[in-house]
Image (tube, rainbow, N blue to C red):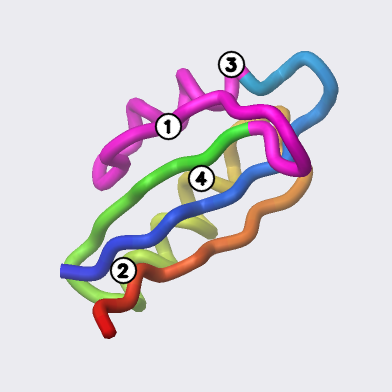
Amino acid sequence: MVQAYILIQTEVGKASLVAESISQIQGVIQAEDVTGPYDVIVRAQADTVDELGRMVVAKVQQVEGITRTLTCPVVHL
């Protein structure tokens, strides 16, 4: 199992709608509105890194109102 944080920038005023839409995607554990340089932070999981990448590109990035994403895989050191 691979987990990652996805940091999302949105259009002005769209953070709540984006977080709500993303929370419905299979594999998303949590989606929260935040303040700072990013507007939404998502915790997601998938079976493989490739599957996680496909979820981000095919599902998360397709949500209306998103302008940029940064995916940060969780590592266990």
Residue under pointer 4: 60
Q: Amino acid at mark 1?
A: Ala
Position in image of residue 67 (x %, y %): 78, 43
Q: Report the residue at 77% width, 43% height from top.
A: 37
Q: Is residue 64 left or right of residue 20?
A: right
Looking at the image, which residue sits at the far right?
12
Position in image of residue 19 (x %, y %): 51, 25
Residue under pointer 2: 51
Q: Amino acid at mark 4?
A: Val
Q: SS class of the residue under badge 3?
A: helix
Q: SS class of the residue under badge 1?
A: strand
Position in image of residue 20 (x %, y %): 46, 19
If you read the primary sequence from the N terminus, does the residue marked by circle 2 or circle 3 appear first?
Answer: 3
Mark 4 near mark 1, Cβ–Cβ under 8 Å?
no
Mark 2 near mark 4, Cβ–Cβ under 8 Å?
no
- Name the front one of labels 3 and 1: 1
Residue under pointer 1: 31
If you read the primary sequence from the N terminus, does the residue marked by circle 4 or circle 1 appear first?
Answer: 1
Q: SS class of the residue under badge 4?
A: helix
Question: Is residue 22 one of those drawn in magenta?
Answer: yes
